């Protein structure tokens, strides 16, 4: 229907209300997005400067340090702020720690970051945190801080300062705190206790001179000349901070000139560099070259590394220390922090230890770890540097990889805490028996091919090796346990006792602990191995003395059903091994009962107990727990909101005016001043008043678009009127009024479920009313529908007329007191129309009433007792059909000679011939009796065939609405 | 129709005898209305059929070593034939991202819009079924059918999978095997979370359903918006805005497979879904109880 389409189009047109609502939503959305992505102005200012400090053994060698100073807004001499000296990792620059510095500056600390000597744009050579060089440099920077008026001071020349750093920077923090008592607190992260032991570890407790050289890490440490920073060596905060490779354009002050500093091979200032040592100091370089050549450390080299180690000076550290160490760290394993913690705590200094799942191999770790460490550091500094906040507890916190994050495929760590730091030995030890025969394994010449356990310097990539770690056939021996009957949470260093025999009397072996999943690969926790160098070995393994190997500390849950596997290998990519090919025999400490499948006959089974340290900790609640409360609160709020809403609606419903308008109590329908104006301003109904009384069949007559259907829609509660009232039996009718149940309706054509038969449709409709079946009077309805057997066919197969009849039947279900039918004869054939007229007239006889809308004049005239003529949204006439039609003054004459008749009639006084197009003669007799007119015509010899009074509704209709055929919808 | 029949006696509120607003369009009546529809029968039938089709497909064992992707969770496919629980998990995995979305959108998006397009909506309102009641009943039945579809899918998969592959622990590569009993609980948890996440689709489809009389528009619109949200969620450049996408947490149920279970994202996902659904439904009720029904 074009008028419907037009109406729809009109409604879709932008009205002012829609515009306002739409633009409000748009603005809000834009504001939300803008707010989310808008860069915040940092609450601090930064100053880059080169600071010249004098250090060296005599304190007289000048060196330029490239620094950046972050000063929080509002800091002044009147309101001095505490400071943090932030040191970077090996190979980094002041830019490596940018994000940490910004973080700390945001917390209200003045932060001084600097590029250590030998790196970046700073001058000098690398002395590996030498007390006379790097450490003294840092002490001079404390002097610089003390000279600034905005920095808080404990005494003249003594700034309130904390020192924070990771790896190389962490070592500096420890050494500086030992050397300079002005330091108020330190947070050393993923750093060493003994640099000699770190690079020359030995897991049976021997000195670094007998250690196995960690050539992989050492090579990266020393030899990386590619110009990229060592991400893995930087502080945890910078490990993934994007510093790697950024040295080329080092800061705004760095200009565009390539910064050669990161490359050991060139020093700033154009000094020709030693190609062998780069920016390393000569003594450090020489020591490295000696160790790397032989794979063994001489006492001088050990002495040099020890000089750069906190191990010997821990008793002098009085600054409260927060030690952070990573479990995924094959360079500085957990045992290093453990040694530091024990050493510092022995002097009575507060120490707190935290382990996380990252490290030199694992990077920053998962978000939960980063959050925890950030919190711990902020809390530590707040109390010990800023001087506010409660004393932090010294509880030990650690975390374990719990699995993969389901959303971003990253790792997920669960945090745990326990009141006292247990050390790497754990609080309890769980012995697990492993067994296996003595096995012969070969040492590959020149350490090639070698097993790969970790990939140093690749950051988080090493963790991917879990389970891939390749042990080469013939180069390793395996000893396995039975499946564990329950899960064990390992926190600390496992121990196992082995025996080995070697024809040369010496052996270098790598002992590893695997977690063997029966359904999956065996996993080597973080690629950590225990290198051992055994001497004085017999040639026969039965004569060998058992040695206890302390495996690297791990944090791992070994699930029930998994096995433990001890692997003893002869080679490892990351370590220097003997060049000569030798075949060793390895076995576990003692004999064991039983046999194993695949074991050569006669071979004795050897066994030992792996001691797994465990710690039972409380899981740390992550901030995410808040969301659970939020969820509970949300659900509660929704439920509460629903209850309140229902209560309010009920109350309003109860208050609802159910009074009966006494005047209209017995009138089926009273419409008063009805007006409907659509949102786009179209007035469909401007003012309509009419009544339908009992016993009446009222016709609502009007051209298309006059407002009939809108009136009926309002009457059915489908549309809200703009103004006006409708009363049905005195009850005010609004959408959903119960009184609607007394009205049966057919509005705008039938509406049936196409997949149901006619009868099922009627039943479904009646079921939806919830009224008793007996009240429906199905038989009468079906009789009216007159569909015969077709009532059992699906309505989608019905013709238009069948549907129309079914719809009228549906409207009559329950015999409603008021029947409202919109164009009821639409689609019916003439006999059915005649039948329908009878039905409607009869329907109105029992005190019921019928309202029929139609644009067909004849239908209204023949069906209705009363008519309401609507035009352009207004009533132009209402009353009994006869009254509206009235006694028409015009008469139609069928005559033999029209022209003659015209001449005759023109002579008659008062009689006027109306213009008629189709040849008929229509005459306004104007009071003259028709018989007289006929007599005149006959007298004049004109034959009269027929005389018809023109009292047709059509005349009335046309007289009322005008002859313009354009619908009032086109107003 | 004879003259002896009397008009029905009115009650105080003006309703016909036997008419009570709260008795109109009962849940049962609406359930039967929907049950009689082909689309309901087909959708539910397919839920039963799908696991059986998958089961048959697994019988065609191929030597092709396809990498199905998805990293650690991708191996759920390889584990699908290890037992009934894993088979059910697989069936849920393959259907959760699209099929279930379409089914829920179908039940919730079609319910009002199709009545409007048939023209039967105005007759229900003229009964009169109070508008809020009409919506509440339609929503409850649509959600009921959605839940039924989910349960049918899982139930059939569990039954067929257990009969074919046996009753064994729930295994995944992200964590240790979960004993069958606890695995069943986890599976129920996954079903529950999926049901909650799909509330977003239900809300969106229902809102569209009351806003249009084209059923296809409501169903398709909801699915399209869901896909749009999924695509946006792939764009990491959106940063924190992604957290507010309705689909962002849609796969958080995978966290229930690890030990200990990762519930943080599930909780966030539930909050997100409930918020969206509440907003959509509120808008739907607000709109429908005020609008002029012109269909």
Image (cartoon, coloured by chain):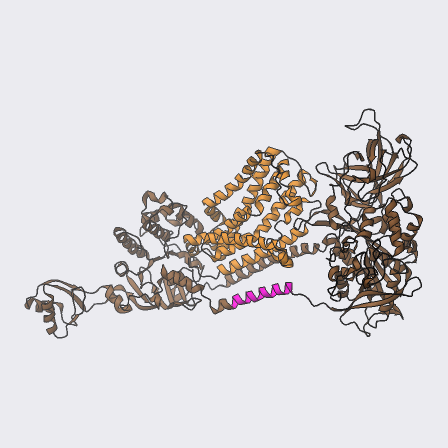
Chain colours: A brown, B orange
Image check: A323 left or right of B184? right
Residue sitting at the far front: A272
Q: Residue furthest top?
A: A601
Q: What residue do we see at 58% from left, 65% from top?
A: A30
Q: Quadrant of the C terminus of chain A?
A: bottom left
Q: Position of residue A27 (x, y in %)?
A: 57, 67
- Number of numbered callouts drawn: 0
Report the residue at 40% width, 55% height from top.
B9
Query: In the image, A379: left or right of B114?
Result: right
Closer to us: A893 or A457 = A457
Horizontal and vertical percent for residue A586?
A: 85, 33
Q: Quadrant of residue B61?
A: top right
For the residue pair B241 and A788, the one nearer the viewer reads as: B241
Coordinates of residue A392 in the picture (x, y in percent)? 82, 59
Quarter of the picture containing the N terminus of chain A is bottom left
Main SS category, magenta section: helix
- State the residue in front, B130 or A591: A591
Which stretch is magenta?
Answer: A20-42
Residue A573 lies in the magenta-colored region: no
Q: Is residue A765 left or right of residue B144?
A: left
Q: Is residue A870 visible?
A: yes
Q: Is residue A34 magenta?
A: yes
User: Does residue B12 appear in the picture of this structure?
Assistant: no
Expressed as whole percent of the image width and height from the top left, the position of residue A196 reads 88, 50
């Amino acid at each position: 229907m074009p008028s419907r389409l037009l109406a729809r189009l009109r409604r879709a047109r932008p009205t002012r209300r829609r515009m306002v609502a739409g633009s409000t939503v748009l603005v809000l959305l834009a504001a939300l997005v803008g707010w989310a992505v808008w860069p915040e102005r940092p609450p601090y200012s930064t100053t880059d400067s080169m600071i010249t400090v004098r250090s060296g053994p005599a304190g007289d060698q000048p060196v330029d340090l490239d620094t950046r100073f972050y000063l929080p807004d509002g800091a002044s001499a009147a309101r001095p702020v505490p400071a943090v000296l932030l040191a970077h990792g090996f190979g980094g620059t002041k830019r490596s720690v940018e994000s940490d510095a910004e973080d700390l500056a945001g917390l209200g600390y003045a932060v001084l970051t600097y590029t250590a000597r030998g790196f970046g744009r700073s001058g000098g050579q690398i002395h590996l945190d030498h007390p006379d060089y790097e450490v003294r440099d840092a002490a001079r920077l404390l002097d610089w801080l003390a000279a600034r008026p905005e920095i808080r001071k404990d005494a003249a020349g003594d700034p309130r300062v904390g020192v924070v750093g990771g790896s190389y920077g962490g070592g500096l923090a420890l050494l500086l705190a030992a050397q300079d008592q002005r330091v108020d607190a330190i947070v050393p992260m993923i750093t060493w206790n003994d640099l000699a032991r770190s690079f020359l570890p030995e897991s049976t407790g021997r000195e670094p001179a007998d250690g196995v050289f960690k050539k992989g890490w050492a090579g990266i440490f020393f030899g990386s000349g590619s110009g990229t920073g060592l991400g893995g060596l930087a502080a945890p905060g910078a490990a993934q901070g994007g510093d790697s490779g950024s040295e080329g354009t080092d800061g705004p002050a760095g200009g565009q000139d390539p910064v050669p500093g990161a490359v050991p091979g060139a020093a700033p200032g154009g000094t020709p560099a030693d190609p062998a040592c780069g920016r390393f100091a000569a003594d450090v370089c020489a020591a490295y070259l000696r160790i790397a050549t032989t794979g063994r450390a001489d006492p001088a080299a050990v002495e040099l590394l020890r000089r750069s180690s906190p191990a010997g000076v821990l008793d002098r550290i009085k600054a409260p220390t927060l030690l952070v160490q990573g479990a995924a760290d094959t360079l500085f394993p957990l045992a290093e922090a453990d040694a530091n913690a024990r050493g510092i705590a022995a002097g009575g200094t507060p120490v707190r230890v935290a382990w996380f799942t990252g490290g030199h191999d694992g990077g920053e770790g998962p978000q939960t770890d980063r959050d925890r460490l950030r919190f711990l550091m902020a809390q530590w500094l707040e109390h010990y540097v800023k001087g506010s906040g409660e004393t932090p507890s010294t509880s030990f916190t650690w975390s374990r990889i719990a699995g993969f994050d389901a959303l971003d495929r990253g790792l997920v760590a669960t945090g745990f805490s326990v009141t006292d730091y247990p050390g790497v030995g754990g609080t309890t030890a769980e012995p697990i028996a492993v067994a296996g025969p003595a096995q012969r394994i070969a040492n590959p010449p020149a350490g090639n091919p070698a097993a790969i356990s970790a990939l140093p310097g690749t950051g988080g990539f090493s963790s991917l090796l879990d389970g891939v770690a390749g042990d080469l056939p013939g180069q390793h021996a395996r000893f396995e346990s039975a499946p564990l009957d329950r899960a064990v949470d390992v926190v600390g260093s496992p121990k196992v006792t082995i025996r080995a025999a070697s024809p040369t009397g010496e052996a270098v072996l790598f002992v590893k602990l695997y977690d063997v999943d029966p359904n999956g690969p065996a996993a080597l926790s973080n690629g950590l191995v225990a290198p051992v160098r055994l001497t004085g070995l017999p040639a026969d393994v039965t004569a060998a003395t058992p040695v206890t190997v302390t495996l690297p500390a791990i944090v791992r849950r070994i699930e029930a059903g998994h096995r433990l596997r001890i692997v003893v290998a002869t080679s490892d990519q990351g370590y220097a091994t003997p060049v000569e090919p030798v075949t060793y025999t390895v076995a576990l400490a003692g004999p064991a009962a039983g046999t194993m499948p695949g074991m050569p006959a006669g071979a004795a089974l050897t066994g030992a107990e792996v001691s797994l340290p465990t710690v039972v900790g409380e899981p740390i609640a992550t901030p995410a727990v808040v969301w659970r409360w939020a969820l509970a609160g949300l659900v509660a709020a929704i439920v509460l909101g629903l209850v309140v809403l229902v209560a309010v609606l009920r109350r309003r419903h109860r208050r609802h005016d159910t009074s009966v308008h006494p005047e209209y109590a017995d009138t089926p329908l009273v419409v008063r001043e009805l007006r409907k104006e659509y949102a786009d301003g179209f007035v469909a109904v401007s003012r309509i008043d009419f009544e339908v009384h009992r016993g009446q069949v009222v016709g609502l007559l009007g051209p298309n678009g006059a407002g009939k259907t809108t009136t009926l829609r309002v009457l059915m509660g489908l549309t809200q009127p703009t103004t006006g009232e409708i009363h049905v039996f005195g009850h005010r009718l609004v959408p959903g009024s119960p009184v609607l149940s007394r009205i049966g309706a057919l509005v705008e054509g039938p509406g049936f479920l196409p997949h149901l038969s006619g009868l099922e449709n009627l039943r479904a409709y009646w079921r939806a009313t919830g009224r008793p079946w007996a009240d429906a009077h199905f038989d009468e309805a079906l009789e009216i529908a007159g569909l015969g057997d077709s009532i059992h066919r699906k309505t989608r197969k019905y013709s238009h007329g069948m549907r129309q009849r079914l719809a009228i039947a549906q409207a009559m279900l329950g015999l409603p007191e008021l029947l409202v039918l919109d164009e009821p004869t639409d689609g019916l054939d003439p006999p059915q129309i005649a039948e329908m007229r009878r039905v409607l007239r009869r329907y109105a006889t029992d005190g019921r009433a019928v309202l029929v809308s139609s644009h067909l004049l004849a239908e209204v005239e023949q069906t209705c007792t009363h008519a309401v003529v609507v035009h352009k949204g207004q009533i132009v006439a209402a009353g009994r059909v006869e009254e509206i039609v009235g006694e028409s003054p015009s008469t139609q004459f069928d005559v033999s000679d029209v022209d003659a008749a015209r001449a005759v009639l023109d002579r008659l006084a008062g009689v006027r011939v109306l213009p008629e197009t189709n040849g008929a003669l229509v005459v306004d007799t104007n009071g003259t009796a028709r018989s007289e007119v006929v007599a005149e015509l006959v007298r004049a010899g004109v034959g009269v065939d027929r005389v018809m009074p023109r009292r047709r509704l059509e005349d009335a209709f046309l007289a009322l609405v005008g002859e313009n055929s354009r619908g009032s919808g086109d107003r | 129709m004879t003259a002896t029949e009397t008009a029905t006696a009115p009650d105080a509120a003006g309703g016909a005898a036997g008419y009570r607003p709260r008795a109109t369009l009962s849940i049962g009546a609406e359930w039967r209305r929907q049950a009689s529809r082909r689309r309901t029968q087909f959708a539910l039938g397919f839920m039963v059929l799908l696991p059986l089709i998958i089961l048959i497909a697994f019988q065609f064992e191929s030597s092709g070593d396809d990498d199905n992707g998805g990293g650690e969770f991708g191996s759920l496919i390889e584990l699908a034939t290890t037992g009934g629980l894993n088979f059910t998990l697989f069936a849920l995995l393959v259907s959760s991202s699209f099929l279930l979305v379409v089914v829920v959108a179908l039940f919730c998006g079609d319910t009002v819009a199709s009545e409007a397009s048939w023209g039967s909506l105005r007759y229900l309102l003229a009964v009169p079924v109070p508008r809020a009641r009409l919506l509440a009943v339609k929503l409850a039945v649509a959600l009921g059918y959605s839940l039924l579809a989910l349960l049918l899918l899982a139930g059939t998969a569990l039954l067929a999978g257990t009969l074919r592959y046996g009753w064994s622990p729930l295994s995944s590569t992200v964590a240790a095997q979960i004993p069958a009993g606890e695995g069943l609980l986890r599976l129920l948890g996954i079903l529950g979370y999926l049901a909650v996440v799909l509330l977003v689709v239900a809300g969106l489809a229902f809102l569209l359903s009351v806003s249009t009389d084209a059923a296809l528009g409501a169903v398709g619109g909801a699915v399209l918006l869901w896909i749009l949200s999924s695509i946006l969620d792939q764009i990491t450049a959106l940063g924190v805005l992604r957290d507010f996408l309705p689909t962002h947490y849609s796969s958080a149920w995978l966290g229930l497979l690890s030990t200990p279970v990762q519930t943080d994202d599930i909780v966030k996902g539930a909050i997100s879904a409930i918020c969206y659904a509440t907003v959509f439904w509120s808008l739907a009720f607000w709109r429908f109880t005020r609008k002029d029904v012109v269909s």
